[in-house]
Image: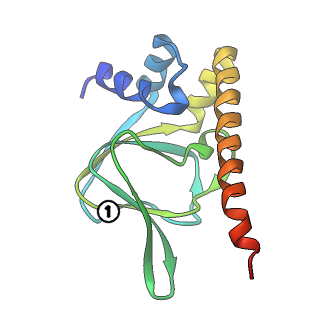
Amino acid sequence: MALDDDIRILGTVGLFESFTAEQLRLLAFGAERLVLRAGRELFREGQSADCAYIVVSGSITLFHEQNEGRVAIRPVGPGAMIGEMALIAQTSRLTGAVAEAETEVIRISRAIFRRILEEYPEAAAALHSHISRNLRELIGEIEKVAPRLNDD
């Protein structure tokens, strides 16, 4: 696929929605495309995380390893970002991820993402707003289920 296709795809991802065309071009230029065969692991639970992935085509299943084997958490498809926290913080993978079918992803490294934030302070401000909004939504979801968690 061409660079312009990657720019278009990246522009649809929530975390990058406020990026300018120039910022998206830099991000796409520093990105890497990977094609995974069905059954191939993208990453393992507990593995150090230094990048995020955007699913371009196909399907990835997030899972936990249990004594009985893999327990699927949820599938993610085209347009979804996996592991966005790795772009802004040193972290490890909270789940494993495996391709359910032939799947194409775009890999965004923490280094290229940080470079964009350093060179474009307005992108960093937009990131702050995005994270704040996501945190408020998460708190709202937790508040909805909290009464059920407190019931004995």
Residue 124 placement (x, y as % from top left): 68, 23
Number of numbered discs overlaid on the protein picture: 1
Q: Which residue is pictured at 66% across the width and 39% down the height?
A: 88
Q: Which residue is pictured at 65% across the width and 22% down the height?
A: 126
Please name whichever residue, 37 or 111, is drawn nearer the observer in this view of the structure.
37
Q: Which residue is pictured at 64% across the width and 40% down the height?
A: 134
Write down the quadrant of residue 69 in the picture. Answer: bottom left
Secondary structure type for disc 1 = loop
Left/right placement of residue 101 relative to residue 11 reads left
In the displayed structure, 69 sits above or below 12; it is below
Q: Quarter of the image for the N terminus: give it.
A: top left
Residue 27 placement (x, y as % from top left): 48, 25
Q: Which residue is mark 1?
A: 40
Left/right placement of residue 10 relative to residue 19 reads left
Residue 33 placement (x, y as % from top left): 34, 38
Q: Amino acid at mark 1?
A: Arg
Write down the quadrant of residue 32 in the picture. Answer: top left
Please name whichever residue, 130 or 60, is drawn nearer the observer in this view of the structure.
130
Q: Which residue is pictured at 69% across the width and 43% down the height?
A: 135
Q: Quarter of the image for the C terminus: give it.
A: bottom right
Please name whichever residue, 2 or 94, is drawn nearer the observer in this view of the structure.
94
Neighbourhood count class around disc 1 (C-alpha, 10 Å): few under 14, some 14–19, many 20 upward: some
What scheme was used to colour the molecule? Answer: rainbow
